[in-house]
Image: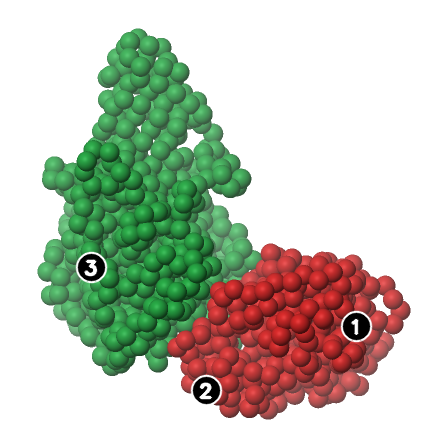
Chain colours: A red, B green
Amino acid sequence: MRPFAYAAPASVPEALDALVAAGPDARFLAGGTTLYDLMKLGVEAPPAVVDVHRLPELAVVDTAGPDELVFGAGARMADVAEDPVLLRDYPMLAESLAKAASQQLRTMATVGGNLLQRTRCSYFRGGAPFACNKREPGSGCSALEGIDRAHAVLGTSDSCIATYAGDWAVALIALDAVVDVLGPDGARTVALADLHHEPGSHPERETTLAAGELILRIRVPTTRTARGSTYHKIRDRESYAFALASAATAVALDADGVVTDARIALGGVATRPWRAAAAERTLVGAPLTVDTARRAGEAALAGARPGRHNGFKIELAVRTVTDALRIAGERAVQ
Amino acid sequence: MSTETAPPSTVRVDARDKVTGTLRYGTDRVPPGMLHAALAVATVAKGRLVHLDTEAAAALPGVHLVLTHADADELTSGGFLLGGGYGFQSFQPLTGDRIAYRGQPIALVVADTLHVATEAAALVRAEYESEPGAFTLDAPGAEALVQSEAIPLPMFADVVAGDADGVLAEAATRPGAVVIDAVYDHPAQHQNPMELIGTVAEWRSAGDGGADILTVHEGTQNAGAVQHGVATQLGIDADRVEVISPSVGGGFGQKNSLQPQTALVAIAARRVGRPVKLVVPRTQVFHDSSFRPATRQHIRLAADGTGRMLAAVHEVDQQTSRHDLFPGTHTEITSRLYGIPNYRGLQRLVRTDVQTPGYMRAPYEHSAAFAFESAVDELAVALGQDPVELRLANDTDTDPVSGEPFSSRHLAECLRRGAERFGWARRTPEPGSMRADDGSRVGWGVAVGCYPGMAAPTAARVCAEPSGAVRVEVGAHEMGQGLRTAMVRTVAADLGIPAGDVTPAVGDTRALPHHLTAGSWGTAGALPAIALALAELRTALKVPEQGPVDVAAAVAATGRDSVEVEAVYTAPGQPPQVLDRLRAGLPAPGGPEHPGFVTFSWVAHFVEVRIEPTIHRIRVPRVVSVADCGRVASPTTAGSQLRGGVVWGISAALRESSEVDPRFGGFLNASLEEYPIAVNADIGEIDVDFIDTPDPMLNSLGVKGLGEVSMVGVAGAVANAVHHATGRRFRRLPIHLEDVL
């Protein structure tokens, strides 16, 4: 690890100023579970970090309001995972947090920082001798001809097939979450669906955040649909592992069991949090059955591109969506 | 020996220290003035170092030393453990410009802090002349050797009994006979003990005009090899090296020999004149310590129409390094699992460009039993026989290889008792015929295992104090297996004193010569050594040979300050020369073929898997395992050992694989995050039981080894259960979700 400057300003405005003052490569530090990890690996080497994880403005969580759920970016994943409103009315959100990482990491990590969690691609994290366009633009991609079992099948490019590793953003994107950001040029609100880039020819550009912008909070419109929801995470072991495939699903059913609202997003198979809007549309107006659920899963994976070892993820993700819709349907209020 | 006053079986003497964090491991030692070290490692997998630029590293403020092959002239190889030396491999980094594997250390940096050392190591710039390498069994350039020709030693010879090939050929044409012919693949795996590899080295003047004394603190299963190996490497007398390793944070074979960093740290400490500490990071441990080599195992197994096994041929290809021949003894156990009269085993070694592989819990037996017990299950299916009944029908009291009797073999009872506890009688044989309430397919599988009953020369000392307290020291190592607890129980039970009056000590070469603790011979050697010492103590205290002792009164009656005795245990029939090997830090185990008898530990595992509907995740909700390890020396730690072996077997069967990208060599998933060891959430109920009948011949206490055998056969039972659930036979581990999708 290289030496770096550390500052811990007392307020959000001071933090924004401190970051500008620290120069263009300075980074905000929240829980540190990604940034410090990558700094130890030499993948990230910011000359300065500005610590925002103790800022009280960022810690506010309000899940009692009639219109929206509000999660301060600095709230801890472990705390939000146990929020009673989420556990009762938004199980997909609570589960996406509870199934992430380990209890120790969840206790450190923040819900804002987690949106920006970087990929677990071994070639990205491994440094030399591996080529990685994300780590070193233009250097190539060792994963394309490599061990790609964990890599993405959706949203990939010839430059990068690295999987977006997070869970929380997958659940949030299914519920039309937005993020409020503040930066040198003022405040703005970004739909979570517009926060992440696909890799394209610039896999090093992962988000649409401008230089110096800080995520202040996440807001989620309230919806009764989320009562019938789940975050279904399929992985090589039942904790402390990233998803091979995951599905955030929510359904609302009418008295006849016909779907009136459906939400589907995918994790573990795509280069960014992946909303499957076309799949949702196949369900609305149809009864929720194994067959309609599977058809939705197939629609969600339309256009998936298998690599050398990850072709199974397409069928796995279809089944994960199918099973997640079953669980959501069992929980749904009719 | 009286057992009536044994302390409660639930007591684990170091449990409190462990959970309160007060137990001290090797590199927890922080001597005054200590500096920190970090390694720079090779990024190519094979070739030559043509230029090494250490200028930037050396110039970093806080750096005291950058050690490379260009200026480590006093360093030599400590030799290969299986070639008369002390190291896990003969290849010693920093003794030349050769790059033998990716991740090989090329420089050691010493600095004021760990952070500066780490940064400086990253600043070391290397240029290489790269050469193509071979990293897998099938790779071009991987060179296969027949082990018995390459290593002409009896213990590594082919195992042959009868005429297996002739009987197999005949069985292929005999009506009613069944021949199984299948190949099983096992990947490379890494031990991953929680405690990383590491060393704290400090020098002090002996004050006798002679050379300085080197003290090495590190977690090791082989303090004797570290002591004598480092002495050899540095060209100093072994009595100038002290190795202190009271508690090892898990070894599993990875710490069973001299590691390459120990001498580097010792040299660095001598150069800078201050103590130096190096803890090797996890990713580097994957590349500069031993691992379980990849194997491919070809089994041919013939039985007549009644299920009597007639002949077996077991041929093994095992990965080794370019610079060492790490031998395999897979066939040692598969020739003994059943009374098969015609058997031929062949071991081949395949040279690849990796660090030398080595021992990892049940190093050969785990993969061998996976292969052989899968084949036996295939045989049961082909015959239409119950797999438990088939195994029982092929039981034997006599070792089919040597013709000698087994000292004890309660494998049939393990099977019967396990089947009863598991409810095996309710199994329906047709694959896919059992369902859980949620629609999951249920599979029940069985497999057996065994592990050679070895014994090693072990030194013990017992000291009785006037207070009545007793100190017991053994030249062995506590890796978490419960040796200290077994020591305390043994002394307390023998003397009829409270466990709290007994203080155990292990892992310190200043006290006694230390033999390698591995191969499940640790407790099986330590306890007999203690028994010998206790007999000496009773003589010295002039108390009867048996029965409770008032230690305080007996010591007072001698008129001495304390009464101290020593004893050395050797395996049955071992010649006195093994003591020379013990004192030289060299391995000297005896067995499993002892004079007049053959000893193995035995186990039977029963596994239930459930394959859930839709997604087909493979779950293991319950396991029943019954072991024959002779007398159970410590029920709490024995149960823990057996359950731990089962956990690892499940993990190995369904998860663990060290991934190799052949373009780069080395290992790709070299971290605890990416190398998927099973977690608690993956493990269901594990019900363990013991035959607990003393072995009448191996030693006076009737104990046999347990740690290794616990894992043997688990993976086979899992794979057999998956077959029972799905009708599909998986001959390659690990069995992943996508395999059953």
Residue B251 vertical position relative to residue B569 in the rendered view, above or below: below
Q: Are marks 2 and 3 on the same chain?
A: no
Q: Name the residue under label 3.
A: B73
Q: Do labels 1 and 3 share a chain?
A: no
Label 2 with label 3: CB-CB less than 8 Å: no
Under mark 1, the amino acid is Arg
Viewer can see residue B393: no
Residue B333 image point, x, y percent: 25, 55
Name the subunit of mark 2.
Answer: A
Residue A143 vertical position relative to residue B155 in the rendered view, above or below: below
Of badges 1 and 3, nearer the viewer stands 3
Label 2 with label 1: CB-CB less than 8 Å: no
Q: Mark 1 points at which residue?
A: A219
Q: Circle 1 sits in a helix, a strand or a loop, which is it?
A: strand
Under mark 2, the amino acid is Gly
Q: Distance between the residues labelled 2 and 1?
A: 37 Å
Which class describes the residues within 10 Å of circle 2: few (<14), some (14-19), or many (20+)? some
Q: Circle 2 sits in a helix, a strand or a loop, which is it?
A: loop
Under mark 3, the amino acid is Asp
Residue in the image at 47% along x and 29% along y: B8
Q: Circle 3 sits in a helix, a strand or a loop, which is it?
A: loop
- Which label's residue is closer to the chain start, 2 or 1? 2
Viewer can see residue B106: yes
Q: Residue B346 carries which label?
A: none
Taking depth in this image into account, of A303 and B165 the one nearest to the observer is: A303
Residue A291 vertical position relative to residue B327 in the rendered view, above or below: below
How many marks the image carries: the answer is: 3
